[in-house]
Amino acid sequence: MSGWLGLIGGGEFSFGETLEADRAWLEKTPEGPVGFIPAGSGSVDYGLHFAGYLRDAFGREVETIPIFRVRDGRRLRNAERIAACAAIYLGGGIADQFADALRDTPAAEALAAKIASGGVVAAIGAAAQACGAVFRDLRGSIEYGLGLVPATAVEANFDPGHDRRLRALLGAPGVERGIGISAGSLLLVDSEGRFEALGDTFTLAAADADVVPLVGGAIPE
């Protein structure tokens, strides 16, 4: 049974900017707690505020999974925590920091297994970018992501009128398409490449192709 990866383009949950996006991925989520991973921000308070938001808005329980750096991503206990939750929410922050803590770790394997086994992984902003094959770090260099969306570069807070960053990522080895997700918007993708979109989501088939809205049931090759 396939689960879902939910990519949120950005926005502040405390101001209600992601309310509809969060409702959509939670509707896919089985009963049970939602695990929160703070690796992108390194903030304990982020998890506390998110837990209060999900409890008040949706009646869902949240537990923080303490992954802040790579040694935490390597701890088997944290991979077990991921497996025990119905869904995992990957908090925003800095894509480099997030990817460095999770790339090539048991925690990253547990995230992929969560989606494959019918669970849900939701990622916002920088974490959503790091779920793709590659992303651009703070220095402007192209780095490898977790590859939860294979062969794809993801750009959060995307404005289709300013697509230069996404186009540049399509020149990286192994990248076959780009996806741009505007703030407050959501792209839900299953392991077969089928998708559901909420709000403004776009795809780019090649560096010199047109940016087009995602419409239909499968992401174009």
Image (cartoon, rainbow, N blue to C red):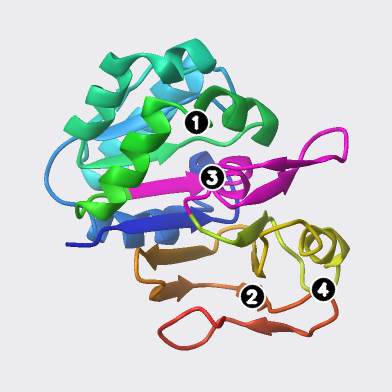
- Disc 2 crowd, CA 10 A, few/some/many (<14, 14-19, 20+): many
Residue at position x 23%, y 24% in the image: 80
- Kindly identify which numbered label has been placed on residue 7: none
Q: In this orientation, which residue lies closer to the viewer: 41 or 144?
A: 144
- Does 210 appear in magenta? no
Q: Looking at the image, do the residues carrying marks 1 and 2 touch, with CB atoms under 8 Å apart?
A: no
Quarter containing the C terminus: bottom right
Sequence-wise, the earlier of marks 4 and 1 is 1
Q: Indicate which disc, 2 or 4, sits on the residue closer to the N terminus.
A: 2
CA separation, marks 1 and 2?
28 Å
Q: Compare residues 133 and 54 and report the one nearer the observer.
A: 133
Which numbered disc, 1 or 3, marks the residue closer to the eye?
Answer: 1
Locate residue 114 relative to residue 30 in the image: left or right.
right
Please state which amino acid type lies under the numbered disc 1.
Answer: Asp
State how far apart marks 2 and 3 are (Cα): 24 Å
For the residues labelled 4 and 3, the Cα–Cα distance comes to 35 Å
- Residue 89 lies left or right of residue 14; in this view the side is left
Find out whether the residues at labels 2 and 3 contact each other: C-beta distance under 8 Å: no
Q: Earlier in the sequence, mark 4 or mark 3?
A: 3
Q: Which residue is mark 4?
A: 207
Of labels 2 and 4, the one closer to you: 4
1 or 2: mark nearer the eye: 1
Whether tag 2 and tag 4 are in contact, CB under 8 A, the answer is no
Which stretch is magenta?
121-148
Rendering quarter of residue 20: bottom left
Q: Amino acid at mark 2?
A: Phe
